[in-house]
Image (cartoon, grey):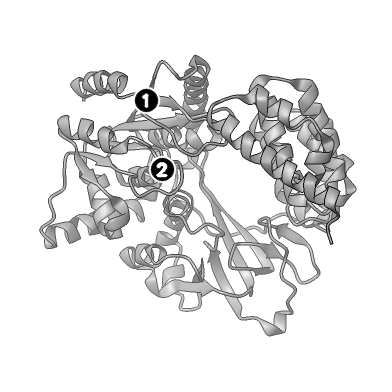
Amino acid sequence: MIKPKDKALDRSARETLRLCRDDVEQGRWNDVVARTHDPALILSLPQLLIYRLNGALATGQDHVIDDVARHVSSLTGREAIAYAVIRDLVANRRSGLAGRILLDNDFLHADHRLLDAADSIIRNTLDEDLQVALGDLMKTVSRGGSEMKPMPTEFLFAPQPPIDQPGSVKVQRSSATSPHHVIALRREARSFQKVIVDQVQPEVLELRDVFTSAIGQVWTEDGRILRQRKSPIPCVERSAVPQIGIAMSSNRPSAGIYHWLVDHLPRLAFLGDSGLIADDTFKVLLNGSNPGFEQTSLDMIGLGDTAHRVDRPVFVERLLVPIVRFEGMAGCRHLDSVFAVMADRATEMARAHGVTLPERVYITRRDAKRRPLTNEVEVEREMQAHGFAIAEFSTLPLWHQIAIAHQASVIASPHGAGLAHLIFSRPKTRVIEILPIKDGAYNLRFNYARLCLAKGHDYVAWMEPQPVKVDGWTVDLPAFGPFLARTMRGA
């Protein structure tokens, strides 16, 4: 039973949390830091530690950030909060501190989130000593799985062709958006342009005699962990699970269409000349609970019969893991066995259904539950005034979505999964992304700029600020309207 004084402390902590949420909505980050100074409140409600950290990050209070890092040692039994601290530090370019937290707190080492967290820190730090220390920790926790090397394989992607039509990136902002976000996107665009000019040929890796789960975890019979996926590894025996001779890994934790279209579909391109399609034993592994658009995609490129939905772990003798990434898409034609085939099929279906495909399309997010655009109705009216048809992709079949993206010469949308369909668009498509931006969100928010550079599109971003810890955001219409008019004059 909670003692009276504990109940009082609990009420105080919850009231503090409510006030912090109000402060965040109004951008009062100094008030957030001041409200969360009492360690007793944080012990009562550890969620307050995340608010304290984000307040300190927003206001540049390094001594408070260091205090938060020290407080992590008191979070035994609240590992999720500790890993949220680590995640936010990495996202805000403080990977060194995140790494020290992970190394210094032994209670985090038995948690299933460690391998992904350590890998993220290693990829985001230049500290070689920290990379080595985290690598040693990963080796121990994964029982040597982190150092296992793929086997040689005979399967190859078609050679990546030169870039015929490189894409371009332009950035403009509302007056409320800090200029440093514009500088960051332009810097990322220049850096990525150099990468795709050098080319990074896609490859196929092969793992032998491994288990894999619905969400893409990979481990061996003797307990070595090759891929953790932020979940505990299931405890199973080989004799108790389905066994597959050769398969391609497309089983994943996310059910979203973005990662399917951008991360997974390009990996299927090597299958065209592999001979595997004619092999009745070959399977493409899918998460058993994911939506039907995955199966629809495979049907459109003649791979429907290869699908194997993983609803419990399977054992695979030869697991093929293709690697493409954004830079591996540049040149495009080596991926035609997927994207050109799907675009042609979608166009045929649109013609058969008598569907009109607009030249200018605005992909609305009016039904979005995450990052809702508070004045999207007004934005839609502005787009319609400039000749855009409004498309709500969540209500359309996949072939219709693909046909629209392939046919349109200008595509506009707020940042969201609808823009993933740009992967089917023709080179030199004009893309207008209305981009909510905040520190710590660059990696994912800049993905469509990277995709457009790789695919040869002409990308223009209109940036608006998105407050930290606040989901909704707004477009400055009096400024956006003239920007759109100028952009369309050049389309």
Query: Where 97 falls versus 144 (above or below)?
Result: above
Locate residue 125 relative to residue 388 in the image: left or right. right
For badge 1, the amino acid type reads Trp
Circle 2 SS class: loop
How far from the left and from the top, in percent, is residue 229? 66, 56
Q: Quadrant of the N terminus?
A: bottom right
Q: Residue at x 56, y 71 (%)?
A: 246
Q: Which residue is mark 2?
A: 416
Query: Where 400 falls versus 160 (above or below)?
Result: below
The numbered mark at residue 75 is none
For badge 2, the amino acid type reads Gly
Q: Which residue is mark 1?
A: 462
Can residue 58 be seen here? The reply is yes
Q: Residue at x 30, y 23 (%)?
A: 480
Locate residue 283 relative to residue 135 in the image: left or right. left
Can residue 100 be seen here? The reply is no
Residues at circles 1 and 2 in contact by the CB criterion of under 8 Å: no
Q: Residue at x 73, y 52 (%)?
A: 113
Locate residue 430 relative to residue 78 in the image: left or right. left
